[in-house]
Amino acid sequence: KGVVLSAENLEYSTGIMVDYLHLTRDDCSLVSIPFFHCAGLLHMLAHIRCAGSLVTGESPAFAGSFLKAVKDRHVTGLPAVPSLMRLLVSNHKKEIADYCSHIRYIELSSEPCDGGLLKVLTDLLPGVAFYNTYGLTEAPRTTYHDIRGETEAVTSVGRPNTGVSVEIFDSRGNPCVPGEIGEIHISGRNVAAGYWRRPEKTGAGFTPKGFKTGDLAWQDTEGRVYLKGRIDKRVKISGEWVSPEEVELVITTLPGI
């Protein structure tokens, strides 16, 4: 589905990135996320906005060239997907500590991130700022979470950004209380106009209660959001709903995985 993002959507989302990541013309980001993915596109636009620079064409899956590019190109920031960072960390701890100690921030997005990975990363790179984020192409940069600033909620993706509202509803359409899992609905300046030439899909997804994300989550009493997987991926085991992401996070803690 093509998503119709307005100039205002992009202006808002890149402005949030510049503010949260403290981007300046001195920043250089190594973007391994494709530019047809909203996370990659927004990093490109945010660095154009602040007159910074980008390094492209490198992936954490190829550790040697990736880490060499971080060092040789004087990279200051890494937007990253947790699963690829987990792969990099599992085999190259020493190299990460040697090659990445000078970077300023790492921004994690696109999938849930477990506390074990975050602890390893923060131990390896004590001087680096870490951000956990959440958003979709239909609603980019919905939340930000400064992991070092709020370590008691390390796996949270944070609170809604200014100008954005996140509400969680149960399967009956009722608002969830703190701790209750439901579907995320997003309203605000970052929400797209709809899907390109798909009126039925637009009507189903963009509702009076906000954009229906299909993502499951819960909020704590401080308003922080914790992702729990997708509605369309859940399976029922022994009468309990289980998300495959929850299973994956447990598996990754096992030795040898």
Image (cartoon, rainbow, N blue to C red):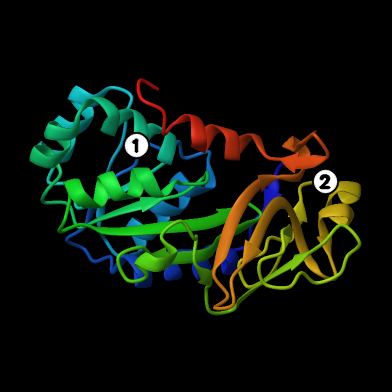
Question: Is 239 on the left or on the right of 16, as rendered?
Answer: right
The mark found on residue 197 in the picture is 2
Tell me: residue 196, above or below residue 170. above
Residue drawn 66% across the image and 54% down it:
138
Above/below status of 13 relative to 241: below
Where residue 73 is drawn, which disc sits there? none
Q: Residue at x 46, y 49 (%)?
A: 109
Q: Residues within 10 Å of mark 2 (few under 14, many from 20)?
A: few
Residue drawn at x 13%, y 32% is 95
Q: Residues within 10 Å of mark 1 (few under 14, many from 20)?
A: some
Q: Nearer the viewer, residue 202 or 179?
A: 179
Residue designated by label 1: 85
Element marked by disc 2: loop
User: Which residue shows up at 15% across the image and 43% down it?
Assistant: 100
Mark 1 residue type:
Met
Q: Name the front one of labels 1 and 2.
A: 1
- What is the CA distance from the residue labelled 1 to the residue labelled 2? 37 Å
- Residue 112 is situated, as x and y percent measured from the top left of the image, at 52, 46
Residue 180: image location, x then y, percent: 72, 64
Does the rendering let one see residue 86? Answer: yes
